[in-house]
Image (cartoon, rainbow, N blue to C red):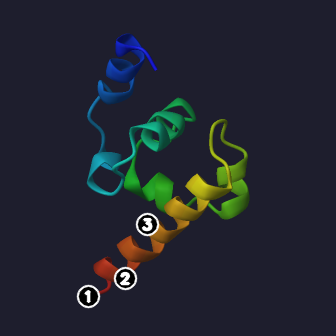
């Protein structure tokens, strides 16, 4: 990836998702799909995730794991 490509990955606008997601690719895919809040993210099912361009099995599993961890932390 060239220098311009790397900076495009890093220069995402701040969003609520920053507190639960660290991967810029994942955040970019979600933002492009209109997912901008944690509540929206938590409402997504596995089948919803696979409908989002750029999200495959590995990223979907990471998001599902993040959802579980977020819900567990919220219930403490």
Q: Residue 30 appears at what percent x and percent y?
A: 51, 40
Quadrant of the rendering where the C terminus is positioned: bottom left
- Eye-nearest disc, 3 or 2: 3
The numbered dot on residue 53 is none
Mark 3 closeness class: few <14, some 14–19, many ≥20 residues within 10 Å: some
Q: Which residue is mark 2?
A: 72
Mark 1 closeness class: few <14, some 14–19, many ≥20 residues within 10 Å: few
CB atoms at circles 3 and 2 under 8 Å apart?
A: no
Q: Secondary structure at mark 2?
A: helix
Q: Residue 26 appears at what percent x and percent y?
A: 48, 43
Residue at x-position 72% and y-position 45%: 51
Closer to the N terminus: mark 3 or mark 2? 3
CA gap, disc 3 to disc 2? Answer: 10 Å
Residue at x-position 46% and y-position 75%: 68
CB atoms at circles 2 and 1 under 8 Å apart?
A: yes
The numbered dot on residue 76 is 1
Q: Which residue is mark 3?
A: 66
CA gap, disc 2 to disc 1? Answer: 7 Å
Side of 71 relative to 35 (left or right) = left
Residue at x-position 46% and y-position 20%: 1
Name the quadrant containing residue 74: bottom left
């Amino acid at each position: 990836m060239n220098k311009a490509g790397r900076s495009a990955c890093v220069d995402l606008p701040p969003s609520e998702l920053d507190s639960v997601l660290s991967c810029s690719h994942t955040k970019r895919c979600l933002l492009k799909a209109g997912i901008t809040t944690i509540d929206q993210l938590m409402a997504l099912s596995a089948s919803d995730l696979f409908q989002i361009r750029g999200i495959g099995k590995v990223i979907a599993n990471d998001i599902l794991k993040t959802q579980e961890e977020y819900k567990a932390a919220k219930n403490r």
